[in-house]
C-alpha cells in the first residue's frame, strides 16, 4: 500500500473528531503521492519545485498516474501548484480504486434497506498495515493526517498519534507536508469567504 492509500483508510474512520472534507483529503493525498515519489527516487525537490528523475514508473496504478503527470520541462512545477492540479477530485479516484481492490465496502447507515450508504474499510492485511503504521505514529502519515484534522486513533485503532507534531527528518518531505498544511488552510479560507458572501447575498434579498 502507498502512503496515499494508507491515509485514505485512516480518514475513513467512522468516529473522527470532525469529518474530513473531500477537498482537504484530496490535497493531502496529492502530497502523500509526492512523498512516495520522493522516497522512490522518482522525483527530487529543489526549494519549492518538483524535479523528475530517471527512476522507473511506480507499480501502483494511481502512483504511476501521478508520475506520468509530472512536468518535466524547466521551470519545473511548484509543489503548491502540483497539489491543486493533481488533487482535483483525487479523493474520489482513491475511493473508486480501493473499492475496486476490495479494500472498501458500502454499507447501509440505517436499519432499513433503503437507508443511505456509507463507505467503510474492509478488514484486510492492507487495512491492518495502515492501522499499525498509524498506531506507531509513523511521522509522515501522522503529519499528513494532522493537516486534515485527524488527530486521534483511526480505522479501529485505539490511541494513535498524540497532539505533538511528529518529527520529519527529511527536508524534502518537510517541505511537502508544509505545503499541504498551507493548501488546506487556503482552501478553508476560501470556504469561509464563500460562506460570508452567501450570507451577505441572502441578507440583501431578505431586506431590513
Image (cartoon, rainbow, N blue to C red):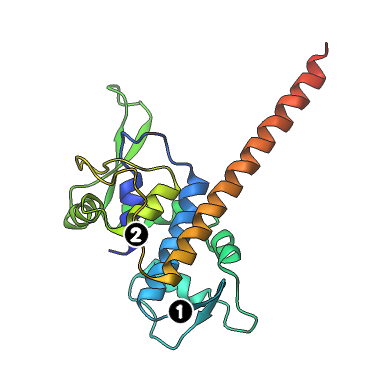
Q: Position of residue 121 (x, y in %)?
A: 26, 46
Whole-number angstrom distance, CA of label 2 to CA of label 1: 22 Å
**Residue 33: x, y in percent?**
42, 66
In the rendered view, tell whether residue 85 sits above or below residue 102: below
For the residue labelled by badge 2, is the local secondary structure a helix, a strand or a loop? loop
Q: How many marks?
A: 2
Picture quadrant of residue 93: bottom left
In the displayed structure image, the side of residue 157 where residue 59 appears, left or right: right
Who's the residue at 58% across and 42% down the image? 188
Q: Report the disc number at residue 88.
A: none
Q: In which quadrant will I find the N terminus?
A: bottom left
Residue 90 seen in the figure: no
Toward the top, the furthest residue is 208
Q: Quadrant of the C terminus?
A: top right
**Residue 177 coordinates in the image, percent (x, y):** 45, 60
Decide if residue 6 is on the left or right side of residue 204. left
Q: How many neighbours does mark 2 have within 10 angstroms: few (below 14), some (14-19), or many (20 or more)?
A: few
Q: Tell me which numbered mark, 2 or 1, is placed earlier along the sequence.
A: 1
Task: Find disc 2 in the rendering and name its residue.
Answer: 167
For the question of whether residue 86 can be seen, the reply is yes
* Pointer 2 with pointer 1, Cβ within 8 A: no
Circle nearer the viewer, 2 or 1: 2
Tag shown at residue 43: 1
On screen, residue 111 above or below 98: above
Residue drawn at the location 33% of the way across and 53% of the way down = 142
| Nearest to the observer: residue 25 or residue 80 | 80
Amino acid at each position: 500500500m502507498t502512503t496515499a492509500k494508507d491515509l485514505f483508510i485512516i480518514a475513513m474512520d467512522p468516529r473522527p473528531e470532525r469529518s474530513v472534507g473531500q477537498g482537504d483529503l484530496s490535497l493531502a493525498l496529492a502530497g502523500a503521492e509526492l512523498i512516495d515519489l520522493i522516497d522512490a527516487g522518482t522525483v527530487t525537490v529543489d526549494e519549492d519545485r518538483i524535479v523528475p528523475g530517471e527512476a522507473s514508473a511506480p507499480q501502483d496504478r494511481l502512483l504511476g498516474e501521478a508520475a506520468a503527470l509530472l512536468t518535466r520541462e524547466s521551470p519545473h512545477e511548484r509543489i503548491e501548484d502540483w497539489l491543486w492540479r493533481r488533487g482535483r477530485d483525487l479523493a474520489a479516484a482513491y475511493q473508486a480504486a480501493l473499492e475496486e481492490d476490495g479494500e472498501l465496502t458500502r454499507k447501509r447507515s440505517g436499519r432499513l434497506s433503503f437507508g443511505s450508504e456509507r463507505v467503510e474499510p474492509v478488514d484486510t492485511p492492507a487495512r491492518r498495515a495502515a492501522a499499525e503504521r498509524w498506531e506507531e505514529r509513523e511521522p509522515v502519515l501522522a503529519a499528513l493526517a494532522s493537516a486534515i484534522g485527524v488527530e486521534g486513533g483511526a480505522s479501529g485503532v485505539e490511541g494513535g498519534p498524540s497532539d505533538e507534531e511528529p518529527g520529519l527528518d527529511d527536508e524534502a518531505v518537510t517541505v511537502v507536508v508544509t505545503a499541504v498544511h498551507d493548501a488546506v488552510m487556503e482552501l478553508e479560507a476560501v470556504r469561509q469567504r464563500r460562506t460570508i458572501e452567501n450570507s451577505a447575498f441572502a441578507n440583501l434579498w431578505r431586506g431590513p
